[in-house]
Amino acid sequence: MKEYNVAVVGATGAVGNEMIATLEHRKFPVKKLTLLASSRSVGKTLEYKGMDIDIEELKEDSFKGIDIGLFSAGGSISEKFAPIAAASGCIVIDNTSAWRMDPDVPLVVPEVNEHAIKDYTKKGIIANPNCSTIQMVVALKPLHDAAKIKRIVVSTYQAVSGTGKKAIDELEKQVLAIYNNKPLETKVYAHQIAFNCLPHIDAFLENDYTKEEMKMVNETKKILEDNNIQVTATTVRVPVFYGHSESVNVEFEKDLSPDAARKILKKAPGVKVVDNPSKKLYPLAIHAAGKDETFVGRIRRDESIPHGLNMWIVADNIRKGAALNAVQIAEVLIKKYL
Ligand code: A2P
């Protein structure tokens, strides 16, 4: 089997770490793995297949001889370095929001629009969608095919790991400070996150939505390739370490009963239905953490409209919402296009 030189950009971060683990556990055919981060991390190593690999500083010449670059070091790094990498022949799979809405960059969730990957040739960049969008479209695509979605109203309950390692540390420190009656430090978020919910993810825009909310609106349309779908979102950060949960209300053109939806979802790729309320079974972030699937439950009719369903969708934001989706894209890329 052909092997590829792979670089992880942002290797020391929460998503970068998971990318390294995902490459290993999915047995991605890696010839050489290059780990890139800032100059702060030079001198450190990370483990891959039992070997300690040195972290190198990300520089303009880091991509010589690299076939595939998995980027997760922030939007400004991707804006600058993705074109540099692509110019040297490296295909970039970018986990940031920098390139997602570029018409020449495919935005891909393999279970939903794998075929879009072919357009990687336009810029040499493939974008990985926003974590909360990925899990929602994995669950909604098969329902859209069956009954055509008119409108989506989504509210999210997003884990701190989506903000990165610093945020995981901040929640842990705040919880400890509260238990120990110590003064509390708030650096990463605008307000205390421990024992709190923040209706504020990413920056506020002129229309009073946050960037995160508009990512869900715009990315959903691009991935489902349907600009007629109406989407409105409220995104909330909650004091959970791993796993995003979402309350999703969907209005369809045709009738779709909860049973029919469950039947479709049971066969859908990447989806696991957990929906037995009488046994107190429904998707939970603590169960989704460390898993690859998108979990769907609490499927019930929206009794206020003719063709509506409500559901609860949960997935590990670092896995399916980031690292796993990126590696799945790389798998399709090498299988079908390289
Ligand atoms: P470093 O650890 O050297 O700062 P997270 O999203 O979990 O906070 O991780 C961010 C990732 O992006 C880390 O691997 C971090 O590396 C990397 N990163 C941040 N700034 C830069 C930069 N200027 N150049 C390269 N990598 C960077």
Image (spheres, rainbow, N blue to C red):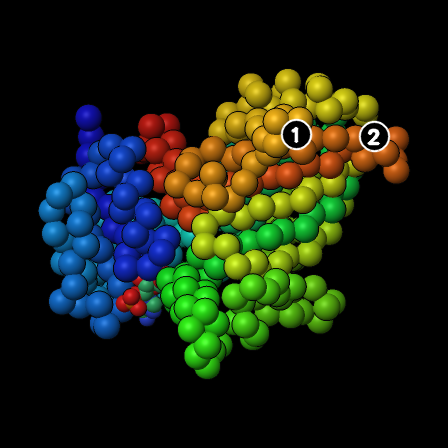
Q: Nearer the viewer, mark 2 or mark 1?
A: 1
Residue 247 vs residue 8: left or right? right
**Residue in view at x 47 percent, y 39 percent:** 288
- The C terminus is located in which quarter? top left
**Residue in view at x 22 percent, y 67 percent:** 41
**Residue in view at x 53 percent, y 29 percent:** 271
SS at mark 2 in the image? loop
Residue 251, given in percent of the width and then of the height, sits at 79, 36
**Local crowd at mark 1 within 10 Å, few (<14), some, or many (≥20)?**
few
Task: Name above or below for residue 30 compared with residue 180.
Answer: above
Residue 265 seen: yes
Residue 212 vs residue 333: left or right? right
- Residue 112 lies in quadrant: top right
Residue 306 vs residue 165: left or right? right
- Image quadrant of ligand 1 equals bottom left
Residue 32 vs residue 28: left or right? left
Q: Give the number of callouts.
A: 2
- The N terminus is located in which quarter? top left
What whole-number distance in Å separates the C-alpha atoms at marks 2 and 1? 22 Å
Of labels 2 and 1, earlier in sequence is: 1
Task: Name above or below for residue 151 compared with residue 81.
Answer: above
**Residue in view at x 24 percent, y 32 percent:** 27
Amino acid type of the residue tagged 1 in the rendering: Pro
Please give the residue where the numbered disc 2 appears in the rendered image.
307
Amino acid type of the residue tagged 2 in the rendering: His
**Local crowd at mark 2 within 10 Å, few (<14), some, or many (≥20)?**
some
Please give the residue where the numbered disc 1 appears in the rendered image.
277
Residue 18, given in percent of the width and then of the height, sits at 33, 48
Dots 2 and 1: beta carbons under 8 Å? no
